[in-house]
Image: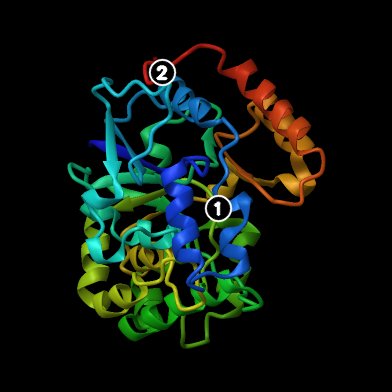
């Protein structure tokens, strides 16, 4: 099957982007968490993302590089496997410009030329070891873990996950889903990650699913189906130029996909790891050097101490495993 990668990126040093950001944030459309440098800043690792794709996942058909019209100077736009995608190419004009990542994600199914099977990456998700298409898709379906997770609703992000579940519970009956796909929800490979599945088996409603923060496989048709069922809610939420508690998130599409039974059980924590750089930068560097996982997420934070040194150590680790330019670089 053809499998595409989609990656979103922003250059917050771009004068036009900064002008638009200041223009709309001054209107009071934003909250503190949405404007932090850690959400938007680029620390120069994007070239290693492309190198990782070419070296460790050479089977990818096409990379859709999604921005608001930006591109790094070193990017080889003549690469036939690269598709430059501007927000205006697929997001309705009335919602642009947007600084809300989830709005950029709602409309991914409208990216021109996107394959039915695609994997979505944030720009802090990296491939650091050999990985095959079977890691993301099996029997034509996304590989995923169907496991509940307690949602404390103590942050904006958790509240948006609760918004997703309200839609899910309106359209799916948990008892019917469990009866139909019992073996997928109670796959032995999940191990202790699925403990809430057993505890909540008698409970009649879905709760938030455990979400590995890393590359996520999707069926494009899932997006069309969700939009058909919840287009009103998603359209209203698209007006949020900055993140708000009334947002939905890509986990809505992922959870819908799982509840529909369109997935193959896979414990994604087996070869995936998120490193909050605030507290685990040293572990992140070691994991990259040792290629300890297939996929890692390097989670930025504005409070990282010795930021320049941390970034340099990570850059050295990437350079160690990916020293050669890719065909995506000039």
x 26%, y 61%: residue: 222
Q: Mark 2 points at which residue?
A: 329
- Which disc is residue 213 wearing? 1
Number of numbered labels in the structure image: 2
Image position of 16 with respect to 313: above or below: below
Position of the C terminus by quadrant: top left
x 39%, y 68%: residue: 252
Position of the N terminus by quadrant: top left
Residue 86 pos. (x, y %):
28, 44
Image position of 271 with respect to 223: above or below: above
Image position of 163 with respect to 262: above or below: below
Residue 183 occupies which quadrant of the picture? Answer: bottom left
Residue 255 pos. (x, y %):
40, 67
Residue 243 pos. (x, y %):
49, 67
Q: Which residue lies furthest to the top in this view?
A: 324
x 42%, y 55%: residue: 20
- Which disc is residue 90 wearing? none
Question: Which mark lies nearer to you, 2 or 1?
Answer: 2
Kindly state the secondary structure of the residue where label 2 is placed.
Answer: loop
Res. 139 in view? no
Which of the pair 242/53 is nearer the observer? 242
Few, some or many residues within 10 Å of mark 2 (<14, 14–19, 20+):
some
Q: Earlier in the sequence, mark 2 or mark 1?
A: 1
Q: Distance between the residues labelled 2 and 1?
A: 27 Å
x 52%, y 48%: residue: 214
| Left or right position of 310 against 100 | right
Res. 25 in view? yes
Kindly state the secondary structure of the residue where label 1 is placed.
Answer: loop
Few, some or many residues within 10 Å of mark 1 (<14, 14–19, 20+):
some
């Amino acid at each position: 099957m053809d499998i595409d990668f989609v990656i979103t990126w922003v250059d917050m040093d771009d004068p036009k982007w900064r002008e638009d950001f200041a223009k709309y944030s001054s209107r009071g459309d934003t909250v503190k968490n949405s404007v932090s440098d850690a959400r938007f800043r680029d620390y120069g690792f994007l070239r290693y993302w492309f190198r990782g794709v070419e070296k460790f996942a050479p089977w990818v058909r096409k990379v859709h590089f999604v921005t608001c019209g930006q591109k790094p100077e070193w990017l080889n736009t003549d690469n036939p496997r690269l598709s430059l995608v501007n927000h205006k190419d697929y997001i309705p004009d009335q919602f642009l410009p947007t600084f809300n990542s989830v709005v950029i994600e709602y409309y991914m199914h409208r990216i021109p030329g996107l394959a039915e099977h695609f994997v979505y990456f944030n720009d802090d998700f990296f491939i650091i070891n050999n990985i095959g298409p079977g890691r993301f898709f099996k029997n034509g379906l996304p590989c995923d873990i169907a496991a509940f997770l307690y949602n404390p609703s103590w942050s904006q992000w958790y509240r948006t996950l609760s918004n997703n579940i309200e839609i899910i519970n309106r359209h799916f009956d948990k008892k019917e889903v469990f009866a139909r796909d019992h073996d997928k929800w109670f796959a032995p490979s999940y191990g202790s990650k699925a403990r809430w599945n057993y505890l909540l088996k008698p409970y009649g409603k879905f709760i938030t699913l455990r979400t590995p923060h890393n590359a996520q496989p999707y069926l494009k048709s899932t997006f069309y189906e969700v939009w058909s069922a919840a287009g009103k809610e998603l359209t209203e939420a698209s007006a949020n130029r900055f993140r708000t508690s009334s947002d939905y998130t890509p986990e809505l599409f992922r959870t819908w996909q799982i509840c529909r039974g369109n997935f193959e059980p896979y414990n994604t924590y087996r070869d995936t790891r998120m490193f909050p750089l605030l507290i685990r930068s040293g572990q992140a560097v070691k994991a990259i050097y040792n290629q300890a996982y297939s996929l890692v997420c390097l989670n930025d934070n504005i409070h990282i101490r010795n930021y320049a040194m941390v970034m340099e150590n990570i850059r050295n680790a990437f350079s160690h495993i990916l020293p050669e330019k890719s065909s995506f670089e000039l």
